[in-house]
Amino acid sequence: MAQEQQQSPPRREIVTGVPRGARRRPPAHAPARSEISEQTTLGATYVRALMRSQLRAGLGALAALVALVGTLPLVFVLPRAASGPLVWVALGLLVYPVMWLIARWYVTRAERNEADFTGLVTDPVERSS
């Protein structure tokens, strides 16, 4: 019984240092940001891919807008009696919301392209912190 009273609880040790996940490891490859700033062919390829995806989004929005506005003359060709109020409904109520939706789609697509590009060129260690 005397031994049980003399035994103290195990000693607690405090470990100090940088957690394993927070240690900065050198990248396995040169980040794409340096490729772009040094204007290498790989960096030019990255920028060209971004420009191509932005151009695709812009041309898609333009094609949708042309299809919307291009069909309006067909509404005007309808017989006068049937097209009177329909023209104003088409011009005043239908065209602008659809144009807004096309613009909204284009902006979100352009922002997604830029976010994908930023994710591509940033160092994975910088993204996690």
Image (spheres, helix red, strand yellow):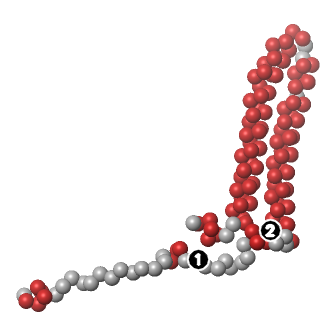
Residue 3, how many percent across, how many down? 11, 90
Amino acid type, label 1: Arg
Pointer 1 local density, CA inside 10 Å: few below 14, some 14–19, many at least 20: few
Relative to 112, is 74 on the left or the right? Answer: right
Q: Residue at x 74, y 48 (%)?
A: 109
Left or right position of 66 against 14? right
Residue that label 2 marks: 36
Question: Badge 1 is on which residue?
Answer: 24
- Badge 2 element: helix
Q: Which picture quadrant has residue 122?
A: bottom right
The C terminus: image quadrant: bottom right
Q: Say if 16 sits above or below 80 in the image.
A: below
Q: Residue sitting at 86 percent across and 14 percent down? A: 83
Numbered badge on residue 34: none
Q: Secondary structure at mark 1?
A: loop
Residue furthest top as drawn? 81
Residue type, label 2: Ile
